[in-house]
Amino acid sequence: MNLKTPLTIALSLALLLTACKGSAPKPIPPPPTVQRADFKVMEVKVADPLDRGIQPAADIKLVTDLVNGYYTAAFLLPSVVTSTFTAEAQPQAITNLDTLTIGGLGKDIKRMVASVQEITRASFFVENDSSIPQAIVEMRFEAKATMKPERGGKQSLKRSPTNIVHTAKFWLQKHEGAFQISAFAADLKADSIAPPTKPKATASTAKSPSALEIHKVQTTQWRPEVGGPVFILVLGSDARNAGPDGGRGRCDAIHLVGINPTTKSGSILNFPRDSYVDVPGHGMQRINTSCFYGGPDLMVKTMTQLTNIPIHYYVITEFSHFRAITEELGGVEVDIPYPMNDPVGSGAQFAAGPHLLSGEEALRFNRNRHDTPNGDFSRTANQATFMLASLKKFRTETQDLSRMFDYFRVARRHTLITVPLNEMLRLGFLAQQIDPGAIQSIVINGSTGKAGDASVVFLNPGDIFSRVRDDALP
């Protein structure tokens, strides 16, 4: 009866990134070393027929300094990028650091040699109903990056160089003698020059199983640009009893997280593990056998069929590093809803009220179903409580944007991620904006009974799935 973790479940919601040692602030890491190219301005146009404020020589120098400075600092160090934006544009910039800067890629770059660093075109103008000088600037940066070796046991695994190409178009406004970015469009491409060569895995180089895996569901597409909700299936797997066809044991924790990026609110739908449902290709079964028969892919199909909700990403976690991840977080503070005294089953023994749970204590709290008011229904509710407590911790610790990338770095030790970097960054910055109090935790209704000799839960969800489907709000 293992719960394979609401901590990582929680952190999946919170950028799905777990593991930061303690909560003390860390220094901002230095940017990669850059050998710079000559800065060039290719084309400049000035349109101010009424002579209402543009000072060509001075304004061109201001914009040139801004762009040159952007590629000297902000592009390499995301934590300072917003200083170049107007107050109105800063929120949008924060959610687009993956295209405005090298973002999380910076941790892997040892050195960059720039070949192009230029303003391709700059146009200065003053609108008819205004006296404020403005500019539209198109710029380009190209570089070859030498990547840091990847650690693999006692060996360092060499990684191939990467070509980096960044293009951007900035709309600028002049205020108090300086230009700031008021709107933008940007694109970042990072392509490996050649496949990396790695030694064959041996006892010393083979990587241990990841504590947390985060994957994109290829049959759906999240559309944040039109305000579409994102749905993340979070699973805890008993991997010690793995099944055929990629199965990973039965899933003891099953949660469907929905977030509305417009309202910055959402819901967590919590499913008892013994829910009796139709598992595609296997007929009526307990829902947790989906992982056993076909791994998380089959569970995604089962949940999609059951709820008719599009699932965009899934997270699966195993027991192996649960305690270590919680310890690296410095513990998670949870308000335990009622006294627990289950010394034989889960080992949970807590008074009601707030507790800073260590790794072992968190595991006990999340496994307890014997000493709870409603058995497995209570356990899945407590898992959601732990998820939201972890989100609160994540949100508090990442008020400093540089901490977001600390989470990325530390998560590499425990996490396998196949989600594209730009999408992971978008999820992370969205999670940072979510108040845990705006997330409603809902245990799916049902009644216990028998299917043959098996104890099961017959679900009675009512209309909750259709209410959540369009906007993630119950």
Image (tube, grey):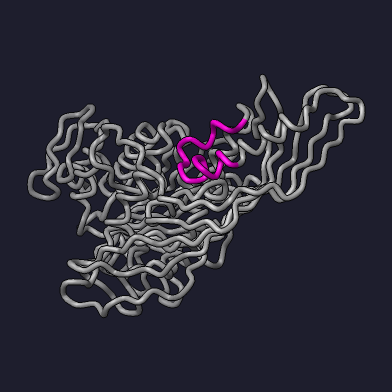
In the displayed structure, does residue 324 sit left or right of residue 50?
left
In percent of the image, x 40 and y 33: which residue is there? 400
At which x and y percent is residue 222? Answer: 58, 55
Residues in magenta, as a range: 68-85
| 382 part of magenta stretch | no
Q: Nearer the viewer, residue 449 or 312?
A: 312
Tell me what residue is drawn at x 40 percent, y 38 percent: 402
The foreground one among 258 and 435 is 435
Farthest residue, direction top: 176
Residue 82 falls within the magenta-colored stretch:
yes
Question: Is residue 127 visible to us here?
Answer: yes
Q: Quadrant of the N terminus?
A: bottom left
Q: Residue at x 24, y 77 (%)?
A: 201
In depth, the one of 437 and 32 nearer the eye is 32
Asked if 160 appears above or below 314 in the picture, the reply is below
Taking the spot 82% from the left edge, 41% from the top edge, the residue there is 45
Depicted 403 relative to depicted 188: above or below: above
